[in-house]
């Protein structure tokens, strides 16, 4: 009995986009604004989606640590 292995070559996966990066001790992530579209950097730890309009185009201001509206 002869067994034949069929190997199917798969294309190499594209590199993952860097979603979080460090700039001078502050961790940022990049949102995509639907107005344009264009990317904008944010340092809020409370974001739940990377598809969010920037504050210049009617989006919410990012919530900063220590300035959380729900803690006031």
Image: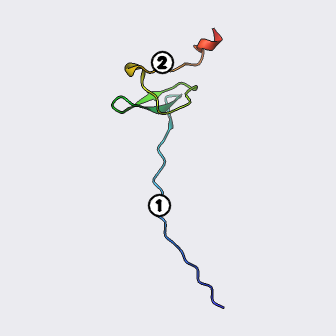
Q: Residues within 10 Å of mark 2 (few under 14, many from 20)?
A: few
Q: Quadrant of residue 4?
A: bottom right
Q: Left or right? Give the position of 8 relative to 68.
A: left
Which residue ends up furthest to the bottom in the rendered image?
Answer: 1
Q: Left or right? Give the position of 35 relative to 22.
A: left
Which residue ends up furthest to the left in the rendered image?
Answer: 36
Residue ID at (55%, 19%) = 64
Q: CA distance from mark 1 to mark 2?
A: 39 Å
The quarter in which the C terminus is drawn is: top right
Q: Which mark is residue 49?
A: none
Q: Give whichever of discs 1 and 2 has the lower sequence position.
A: 1
Question: Which residue is disc 1 drawn over?
Answer: 12
Q: Residues within 10 Å of mark 1 (few under 14, many from 20)?
A: few
Instruction: Return the x and y of residue 46 as percentages of the image width and height.
Output: 58, 25
Q: Quadrant of residue 59?
A: top left
- Label 2: state its secondary structure: loop
Residue ID at (35%, 33%) = 37
- Label 1: state its secondary structure: loop
Question: Which residue is disc 2 drawn over?
Answer: 61
Q: Against 55, is 22 above or below?
A: below
Residue ID at (55%, 77%) = 6
């Amino acid at each position: 009995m002869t067994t034949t292995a069929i190997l199917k070559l798969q294309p190499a996966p594209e590199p993952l986009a860097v979603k979080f990066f460090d700039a001078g001790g502050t961790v940022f992530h990049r949102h995509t604004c639907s107005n344009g579209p264009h990317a904008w950097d944010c340092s809020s730890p409370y974001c739940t989606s990377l598809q969010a309009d920037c504050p210049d185009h009617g989006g919410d201001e990012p919530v900063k640590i220590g300035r959380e509206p729900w803690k006031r």
